[in-house]
């Protein structure tokens, strides 16, 4: 086969490969190839290797051989390169995937929000006005332990049980991560019970947290309790609500699958729910960091309230503003 015939036969493939490689090498998201284009890359790479070998064996012009050789090297680099893009992927998840998914399911978020904070506020007011109501949730031992954790006595680190007063902050960080993520996971996993488990854990956790807050406020443990929880509360409590949102998505797939089978609806909603749970897990870790290293510091309560208010504003702005353009697109 003559060179001009060889070029005419394969020029379309070469141009396709060049365009694909240009998109991959540009680094711009808008010019990156779609999934179908990426799937074609291995086949095009195999073909270009074969074309290069044929061109060399047939002693075609150096210009053609150099062009095919350059394409082969570029395609090889794209297929076999080892790039660590973990940081970029995390950033994309936090500023796009997670918040945009939350925006798509805003109705479930607000339902979860009301189920958690509504009963919590009501029972918190009840325990503030009638402190003995706390015993409908806890026994005497649990109430006494809670009081000791936030006792304003000198030398007492708030938020820690007596046995953990001497624990390191890193150990407490691990403890808080385990405790908080456990609450979030149970709230999420309860959705598989047609959403009933999620409803229960949202209401129950809201009532317990609200009841404790109301009771300790009545005891005038205001600085030790509110000064401790105000910092990490924004991340921790909203993460519980988001875990509930994910659980309600699972429940919807079972109760109202729409035009899909329940299994298919569950598979589709589970993809979205996993994104939400992963985002909530990130928030739980941030909450644990604040709870272990900032919340127990013996600084002025007004400073803690100021930082806490700023963090609540930060979480609210993050969830409201990020991911909106992605959703609109």
Image (tube, rainbow, N blue to C red):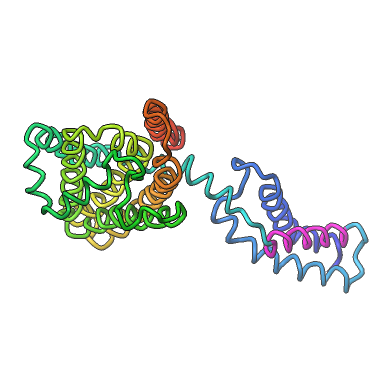
Residue 113, position in %: x, y?
24, 38
- In which quadrant of the rendered image does the C terminus lie? top left
Left or right of 66 on screen, residue 34: left
Residue at figure coordinates x 21%, y 43% from the top left? 209
Residue 299, position in %: x, y?
43, 33
Left or right of 12 on screen, residue 107: left
Q: How many marks?
A: 0
Magenta span main SS: helix
Q: Residue furthest bottom?
A: 57
Q: Is residue 258 visible?
A: no
Residue 224, position in %: x, y?
30, 37
Q: Does the magenta stretch include residue 40?
A: no
Q: Is residue 53 visible?
A: yes
- In which quadrant of the rendered image does the N terminus lie? bottom right
Above or below, comparing residue 256 to residue 299 in the picture: below
Depth order, front residue of 296/324:
296
Residue at figure coordinates x 80%, y 59% from the top left? 7
Left or right of 282 on screen, residue 209: left
Q: Is residue 79 magenta?
A: yes
Residue 132, position in %: x, y?
6, 41
What's drawn in magenta, residue-wise?
A: 64-81
- Find residue 54 and report its image quarter: bottom right
Above or below, comparing residue 209 to residue 189 in the picture: above
Q: Which residue lies furthest to the front in this view?
A: 154
Depth order, front residue of 303/147:
147
Residue at figure coordinates x 90%, y 57% from the top left? 63
């Amino acid at each position: 086969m003559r060179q001009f015939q060889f070029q005419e036969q394969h020029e379309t493939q070469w141009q396709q490969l060049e365009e694909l490689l240009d998109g991959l090498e540009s680094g711009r998201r808008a010019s990156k190839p779609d999934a179908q284009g990426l799937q074609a890359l291995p086949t095009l790479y195999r073909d270009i290797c074969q074309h290069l070998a044929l061109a060399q064996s047939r002693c075609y012009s150096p210009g053609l051989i150099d062009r095919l050789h350059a394409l082969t090297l570029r395609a090889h680099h794209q297929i076999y390169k080892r790039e660590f893009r973990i940081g970029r992927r995390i950033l994309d998840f936090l500023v796009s995937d997670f918040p945009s998914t939350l925006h798509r399911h805003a109705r479930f978020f607000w339902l979860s929000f009301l189920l958690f904070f509504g009963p919590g506020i009501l029972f918190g007011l009840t325990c503030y006005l009638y402190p003995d109501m706390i015993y409908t949730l806890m026994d005497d031992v649990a109430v006494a332990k809670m009081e000791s954790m936030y006792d304003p006595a000198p030398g007492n680190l708030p938020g820690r049980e007596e046995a953990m007063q001497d624990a390191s902050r890193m150990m407490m960080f691990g403890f808080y991560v385990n405790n908080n993520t456990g609450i979030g996971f149970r709230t999420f996993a309860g959705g598989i019970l047609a959403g009933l488990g999620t409803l229960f854990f949202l209401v129950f956790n809201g009532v317990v947290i609200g009841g404790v807050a109301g009771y300790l406020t009545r005891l005038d443990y205001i600085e030790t309790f509110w000064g401790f929880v105000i910092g990490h509360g924004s991340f921790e409590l909203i993460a519980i609500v988001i875990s509930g949102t994910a659980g309600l998505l699972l429940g919807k797939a079972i109760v109202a699958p729409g035009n899909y089978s329940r299994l298919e609806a569950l598979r589709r909603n589970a993809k979205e729910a996993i994104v939400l749970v992963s985002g909530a897990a990130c928030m739980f870790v941030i909450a644990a960091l604040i709870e272990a290293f900032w919340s127990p510091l013996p600084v002025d309560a007004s400073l803690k309230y100021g930082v806490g208010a700023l963090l609540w504003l930060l979480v609210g702005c993050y969830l409201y503003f990020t991911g909106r353009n992605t959703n609109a697109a």
